[in-house]
Amino acid sequence: MAEFNLIINGVGGQGLITLLRIISLASQKEGYDIKTSELHGLSQRGGSVEVHIRFGKKIYSPLVPQGKANLVISLELQESLNGLHYSSPKTHFLINQYKTPTFTKDLSEKEILGIVKKISKNLFLIPASEICQKELGSEVVAGIYLLGLAFSKKLLPLKSDSIISAIKKIIPEKYRELNLKAFELARQSFSSKNLGG
């Protein structure tokens, strides 16, 4: 693999930086060169956050070039639109079916998905927050759940051992078991039913 380009977007408080750290560590464990970048809109909780993660044989820039994203993981529905600049018809989108109630420009789910599908048909809409709240009692691990889905769908070229090891190292002990359960839940969900958009 020459390089893999990943965009994760969402809002403050959804754990994007934690995901960045987990994927970065997992990539390092597998011997990849890695570059990352964090782009913040409003810095407070609820503001837009976008992270770029690039890994491969040799990476020179931390920012994903326009149209070169392999995967966009969106923890918030409307934030998925911020990944379009980096996307092409080959890009896969994993989108959490969750909308922040504070946005002023509030497009409907149908409108948002219609805009994304104009760029790429490789779209999976997953009610990750709802699933994690129902099954684990906490929607805060929705990002880890989506990470588990990305792995299970072979959209993320990393080994499960590397990801699990990184979760154990990055997540504080108090929340470690919950995050590991979210990752495993996603793998079970994928094997038991076909999730699609």
Image (cartoon, grey):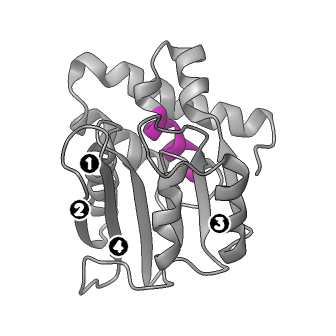
- Dominant secondary structure, magenta: helix
Amino acid type, mark 1: Ile
Disc 1 from disc 3: Cα separation: 24 Å
Which residue is labeled 3 in the image? 116
The answer to whether mark 2 and mark 1 are in CB contact below 8 A is yes
Which residue is labeled 2 in the image? 38
Amino acid type, mark 2: Glu
The answer to whether mark 3 and mark 2 are in CB contact below 8 A is no
Which residues are drawn in magenta?
A: 142-151
Q: Can you say whether 86 is above or below 97 in the image?
A: below
CA neighbours of label 2 inside 10 A, class few (<14), some (14 to 19), many (20+): some
Q: Which of 177 and 19 is in front in this view?
A: 19
- Does the magenta portion include 145? yes
Q: Which of marks 4 and 1 is in front?
A: 1
Q: Which mark sits nearer the N-terminus, 3 or 2?
A: 2
Quarter of the figure with residue 56: bottom left
Q: Which of 22 and 122 is in front in this view?
A: 122
Q: Which mark is residue 17?
A: 1
Q: Can you say whether 89 is above or below 38 in the image?
A: below
Residue 148 in sight from this viewpoint: yes
Q: Which mark is residue 55?
A: 4
Disc 2 from disc 1: Cα separation: 8 Å
Quarter of the figure with residue 14: top left
Say left or right for 193 vs 38. Answer: right
Q: Which mark sits nearer the N-terminus, 4 or 1?
A: 1
Disc 4 from disc 3: Cα separation: 25 Å
